[in-house]
Image (cartoon, rainbow, N blue to C red):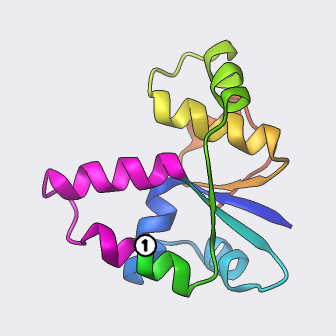
Amino acid sequence: MKVLLDSHAVYWWTIGSERLSTTARSLIEDKANTVLVSAVSFYELDNKMRLKKLDLKPQELRAAVAASGLQTLAVTDLHAELAASFDWDHRDPWDRILAAQTRLEHCSFASLDIAFDAVLHERVW
């Protein structure tokens, strides 16, 4: 199974938070799954770290992602095109990219955010 993690799921996994659901944790820990972290999530989390909203350093985030065997997913022009074309009343550009990546990469999306249900068929939490 391919799973793309929402930014909060990446952060909670990295810090070992109890806020990460049992389902999401199981998907990440299952070595049979391909677990992806979008470049968008790195941007979003790095920005929150810069603003002192998160207690983590960018290098710690990257080290934890690498050590966990999670794979980084780059943003392509096709992701951007689909994200811009969604008929979705959701203004967060980063969420729109994550939704587009989930669709185009044929992934399940691990997220607490039910807003994604409007455009995705497979949100897990």
Look at the image and give the residue range highlighted in magenta: 39-61
Quarter that holds the N terminus = bottom right
Quarter that holds the C terminus = bottom right
Q: Nearer the viewer, residue 104 or 76?
A: 76
- Across and down, in percent, residue 48 comes to 25, 52
Residue 25 is one of the magenta-drawn residues: no
Residue 56 is one of the magenta-drawn residues: yes
The kind of secondary structure element at disc 1 is: helix
Q: Is residue 85 visible?
A: yes
Q: Which residue is mark 1?
A: 62
- Across and down, in percent, residue 104 comes to 81, 38
Residue depicted at 59% across the width and 34% down the height: 97
Which image quarter: residue 19?
A: bottom left
- Across and down, in percent, residue 3 comes to 74, 61
- Across and down, in percent, residue 12 comes to 43, 71
Q: Amino acid at mark 1?
A: Arg
Residue depicted at 69% across the width and 29% down the height: 118
- When the figure is inspected, residue 62 is found, relative to residue 72, above or below; the finding is below
Q: Is residue 42 left or right of residue 6?
A: left
Q: State whether the magenta stretch is mostly helix, strand or loop.
A: helix
Residue depicted at 17% across the width and 54% down the height: 50
Residue depicted at 52% across the width and 36% down the height: 95
Q: Is residue 18 visible?
A: no
Q: Is residue 124 left or right of residue 41?
A: right
Which image quarter: residue 61?
A: bottom left
- When the figure is inspected, residue 109 is found, relative to residue 99, above or below; the finding is below
Q: Is residue 84 left or right of residue 40?
A: right
How busy is the neighbourhood of tag 1: few (under 14 within 10 Å), some, or many (20 plus)? some
